Amino acid sequence: MTPQDRAQDVLAPPAKAAIFLTVTVRDGKEQGAHDALADVAGVTRAIGFRIPEAALSCVVGIGAEAWDRLYAAPRPDGLHPFRPLAGEKHAAVATPGDLIFHLRAGRPDLCFELGRQLMVLFDGLVDCVDEVHGFRYWDERDLLGFVDGTESPTAAAESGPAALVGYGEADPEETYAGASYVIVQKYLHDLDAWERLSVEEQELVVGRRKLSDIELADSVKPDDSHVALNTITEPDGTELAIVRDNMPFGAVGTGEFGTYFIGYAADPGVTEEMLRNMFLGRTPGRHDRILDFSTAVTGCLFFVPPAAFLEDPEPFLARTRA
């Protein structure tokens, strides 16, 4: 079985609706949470089976501290607590999170029902510390009005190596082939301040044309634009990518508007380098200009194990002990 066959639905195409549930496991409830994780796939299938064309899916991620409490094997190599960043003006904060459930579908009612049933399944075992309901906005735009995720690879030949451990290997030696690492952050936007900028000024902040989504020429694009600081290359010039599935969210009554960033990577160091560029700058003090209008209020890193791991981790854990 290849890594892509073992993976959770990390590479699912962008959906019209999503729910992001971040929870912490209660002290003394580790075994119950461990056992409940084995039932997540079955609950997802039961709900999604009724409307298969909506393509309901659920990706489960496990945080570093939760891994140490739930499983006896050593942590996966890239799994560690989210590393906060403190720039001269802006900070990437680390917030609690033992498990994340990333629910996606073509209809919001399926996400809602799956989320409700997951909370029933984990009742008394976990506490929800963050819940975000995302929606598709126009032609894949965020609430700042720009297309989001343009550079996220879509073809399996590109997205697989970016997001999945051991992708492309016919007989991988890696115990967790097909796994991924996911970093999530909830950003709140100051839309009033953003909309006081002209379109041309907004384009210089982002590094793209607002209407066409075409990237600005290097001669025009500022080195502290969002696009410039999120372009990561190896010494040979090869560009490194992550798979983003960001979603806008908002509450019109309270005026809370934002973007939920979620980035899957085979190597979490790629995403972490992007964040360092954004918050610290490639040149000290030259932070990502988009942070002047978007504030990160959460930050977590999770390991997304192969699909079979959650239902029966023992074969995987036995290999790590060998």
Image (spheres, rainbow, N blue to C red):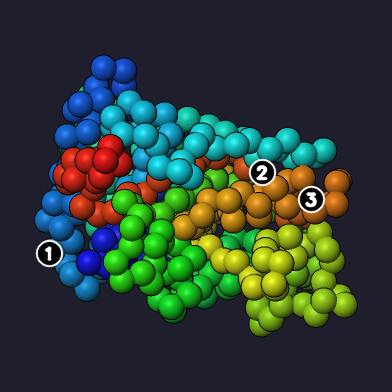
Give amino acid for label 1: Arg
Can you tell which quarter of the image residue 61 is in?
top left
User: CA gap, disc 1 to disc 3?
Assistant: 48 Å
| Relative depth, front residue between 187 and 36 | 36
Residue 27, image x, y percentages: 31, 18
Residue that lies at the very extreme toward the top in this rendered image: 28
Residue 195, image x, y percentages: 74, 59
Within 10 Å of disc 3 (Cα), the crowding (few <14, some 14-19, many 20+) is many
Is residue 221 placed above or below 315 in the rendered structure?
below
User: CA gap, disc 2 to disc 3?
Assistant: 16 Å
**Disc nearest the viewer among 1 and 3:** 3
Within 10 Å of disc 2 (Cα), the crowding (few <14, some 14-19, many 20+) is many
Res 295 label: 2
Q: Residue at x 30, y 58 (%)?
A: 8
N-terminal-most mark, 1 or 3: 1
Res 50 label: 1
Give amino acid for label 2: Thr
Is residue 13 placed above or below 68 in the rendered structure?
below
Q: Give the structural element (helix, strand or loop) at label 2.
A: strand
Whether residue 204 appears in this view of the structure is: yes
List the residue tagged with mark 3: 281
Q: Give the structural element (helix, strand or loop) at label 1.
A: loop
Residue 281, image x, y percentages: 79, 50
Residue 20, image x, y percentages: 40, 48
Can you tell which quarter of the image residue 111 is in?
bottom left
Q: Residue at x 35, y 55 (%)?
A: 174
N-terminal-most mark, 2 or 1: 1
Is residue 193 placed above or below 167 in the rendered structure?
above
Q: How many marks?
A: 3
Q: Give the structural element (helix, strand or loop) at label 3.
A: loop
Q: Residue at x 58, y 73 (%)?
A: 150
Q: Quadrant of the N terminus?
A: bottom left
